[in-house]
Image: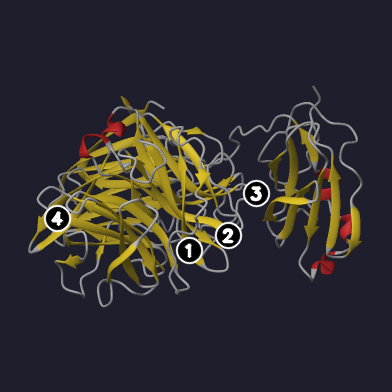
Amino acid sequence: MKKLRIIAAVVAFVVTGSVAEAQIAAPEHLNDTHTMLRVTPTARYLLLPVEEKEENAHVDVLVNNHVERGFNLRLAVDKVDYFVPVELEVGNSPVLFDITFPSDRHKTGSVKNFVCWKEMSLTDNFDTTNREKYRPVYHHTPKWGWMNDPNGMFYKDGVWHLYYQWNPYGSQWENMTWGHSTSRDLVHWEKQNTAIEPDALGSIFSGSAVVDKDNTAGFGAGAIVAMYTSAGRHQTQSIAYSTDGGRTFTKYAGNPVLTYPAPDFRDPKVFWHEGTKRWIVVLAVGQEVQFYSSKNLKEWTYESSFGHGYGNHEGVWECPDMLEFDGGKWVLLLNINPGGPYGGSATQYFTGTFDGHRFVCDSKPSTTKWMDYGKDHYATVTFSNAPEGRRVALAWMSNWQYAGVVPTMQFRSANSVPRDLGLFTSGDETYLSNVPSKEMDAVRGKQIKKPANVCEIVVDVKGSSVITLQNSKGEKVVMRYDETERTFAMDRRESGITSFSDAFPVETVAPTHGVIRQLRIFVDNASIEAFDSEGKMVMTNTVFPTEPYNMIKVSGGKAKIYELKI
């Protein structure tokens, strides 16, 4: 066993394993923008060096003169920030990497002198051990690469399945693919193999998955059917099915199954409507949603549209979800970017009725309801087939204003803690409640004396209060509850590293819809999520302190701090 040498300004991975000798041929530089590289697959991975400041190169991977896959990545020119793996089939035919650089690449010097040619290597092991200061401990994150929207979430046979928008070839948005993780408790997640990869119809954008218990689609009783956006020359809707519980998927030969002449037509959320005995899909189409129905998940009929004049229209509508609650009340979740209450992306929602054909909102068109008043809560969707009739949601815990420049590199972005959703009324309006899922109660440990980088803080509030989390460097997050004004605020302007984006240092303020008696505050390495214990207010913000907050000051209340058993 020989340890490979890495010269990287930020080492995201340590590469160890069997080193293949002389199995990467000298690159053939055809001109300043085109290089070919021949590799004999004697090890499982070819490790490609990435430098994030560079522009994307396009890589086609050819085997026996056929393109097996294609992707974009920022190949290192001057230095290596981290490595990404390309999986090879050991012992198979030689692989040709056909690499095209941007047309102005000559500005950086001769292509033959790029550091990537010296640093790429073959290895049998790709070490994903976390070396990131700000990687969360109890929030789901990708082992490496970029992640945004949660996709295709479902529960079956005791396992929660989370798919997600993933770039396997770098920590910036690109190469959208469905990654896959599973959990038995919504806290501890295990990475699974890549679920759905790009094809001739395009990249794999967001979507959903259902358990087809009655074999309506003909793929088998209990098959998992995923519906997703194929993002190619146009955005169209495709399906894939799994007969092994969601581990592997086969794409339907008749894709796409749904098309529409609009540039933004995406993010299908499928659900079963018991009243009409049909599948319904709701899709984001520009600044409205459209509803379609189907008996078999393959052939779809347009039903209606909703959205014009309702809610916030400052950005594109994305990632819808439909939830039915007891009493016949429905909630339409609708994510928007930009247009959030404090800039960038956020989750709004509408309450009303749905008869299987048409959604009718019960609020005035001018009313906008936000699910979370923090800066870092987006693309919120729920698990289908959840047990006990629960409506369990996860959000992408970032914001499109700065997601690509936050101070991490091995990975980018995390999901929120799981939330169970319900309803409450305030005045004449119905609102969505959010409480930490009961699985978060199960990891609460013993009481400790002071805050840590991973903890839960429970504050019994007595009137207006101020809660300050701080470290020895004076970095702090200040939370203020104003009982008179019925507001809760979180100020992260002095929280630590904030200079990466002018949009990051901000104070966010939420209505409380009544009196807060108790707050539950979840602290992780790079996030703070504050819940009213009754679920009437929730606020999610990421933070990047240079050392953990280990001091707390509370006026107008009493705090108890608990370790989390992770």
Residue type highlighted by circle 3:
Tyr
Q: Please tell me whether mark 4 sits on a helix, a strand or a loop.
A: loop
Q: How many marks?
A: 4
Identify residue for label 2. 202
Numbered circle sitting on residue 169: 3
Relative image position of residue 320 (x, y in whole percent): 34, 59
Mark 1 and 2 residues: CB-CB less than 8 Å, in contact? yes
426 and 201: which is toward the camera:
201
Relative image position of residue 26 (x, y in whole percent): 92, 47
22 and 42: which is toward the camera:
42
Q: CA distance from mark 3 to mark 1?
A: 24 Å
Q: Kindly report which numbered mark, 2 or 3, lies closer to the viewer in this rendering.
A: 2
Q: Earlier in the sequence, mark 2 or mark 3?
A: 3
Relative side of 291 to 27, left or right:
left
Numbered circle sitting on residue 329: 4
Q: Residues within 10 Å of mark 3 (few under 14, many from 20)?
A: many
Mark 3 and 4 residues: CB-CB less than 8 Å, in contact? no
Identify residue for label 1. 236
Above or below, 117 against 121 in this view is below
Q: Kindly report which numbered mark, 3 or 1, lies closer to the viewer in this rendering.
A: 1
Numbered circle sitting on residue 489: none
Q: Quadrant of residue 551?
A: top left
Q: Residues within 10 Å of mark 4 (few under 14, many from 20)?
A: some
Q: Earlier in the sequence, mark 3 or mark 1?
A: 3
Identify the residue at horizontal 45%, vertical 74% (top origin).
261
Q: Earlier in the sequence, mark 1 or mark 2?
A: 2
487 and 78: which is toward the camera:
78
